[in-house]
């Protein structure tokens, strides 16, 4: 029984290690935005409606390769622009490379 528990704990630890990532490093792999850029996104009615909503929803940003999605996403996260109420909002992000 004790051996099984040790084995299970080791498997659990290994699984959790596999699931962890350097999320900050993946985010910061992308360059910072140039001053004055990305403002079009913040002014878009669809973004503001999503950001200001009281319901849980997903913000999906899509475009072709090299269009600036990752730079925009990093700016939104770094500048805390994804929520107007930090006490009631949870923002999750993950960058794939």
Image (cartoon, rainbow, N blue to C red):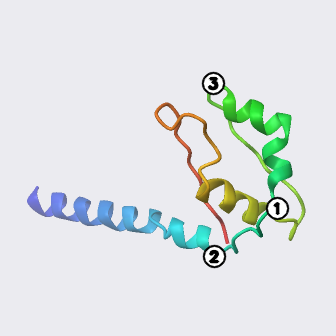
Label 2, label 3: how many angstroms apart (C-alpha)?
Answer: 31 Å
The tag earlier along the polypeptide, 2 or 3, is 2
The image position of residue 31, as x and y in percent, is: 70, 75
Q: How packed is label 3: few (under 14 Cα within 10 Å), some, or many (20 or more)?
A: few
Q: How packed is label 2: few (under 14 Cα within 10 Å), some, or many (20 or more)?
A: some
Q: Which residue is mark 3?
A: 55
The tag earlier along the polypeptide, 3 or 1, is 1
Image vertical order of residue 27 relative to residue 89, above or below: below
Give the quadrant of the C terminus. Answer: bottom right
The image position of residue 28, as x and y in percent, is: 60, 72
Q: Which residue is mark 2?
A: 29
Label 1, label 2: how many angstroms apart (C-alpha)?
Answer: 18 Å
Which mark, by number, is residue 37?
Answer: 1
Image vertical order of residue 52 relative to residue 81, above or below: above
Q: Residue at x 83, y 42 (%)?
A: 43
- Residue 91: image quadrant is top right
Image vertical order of residue 32 relative to residue 44, above or below: below
The image position of residue 53, as x and y in percent, is: 67, 26
């Amino acid at each position: 029984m004790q051996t099984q528990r040790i084995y299970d704990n080791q498997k659990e630890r290994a699984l959790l290690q596999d699931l962890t990532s350097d999320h900050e490093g993946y985010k910061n792999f992308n360059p910072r935005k140039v001053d004055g850029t990305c403002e079009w996104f913040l002014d878009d009615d669809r973004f503001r409606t999503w950001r200001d909503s009281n319901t849980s929803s997903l913000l999906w940003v899509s475009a072709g390769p090299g269009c600036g999605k990752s730079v925009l996403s990093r700016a939104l996260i770094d500048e805390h622009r994804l929520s107007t109420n930090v006490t009631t909002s949870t923002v999750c992000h993950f960058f794939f490379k």
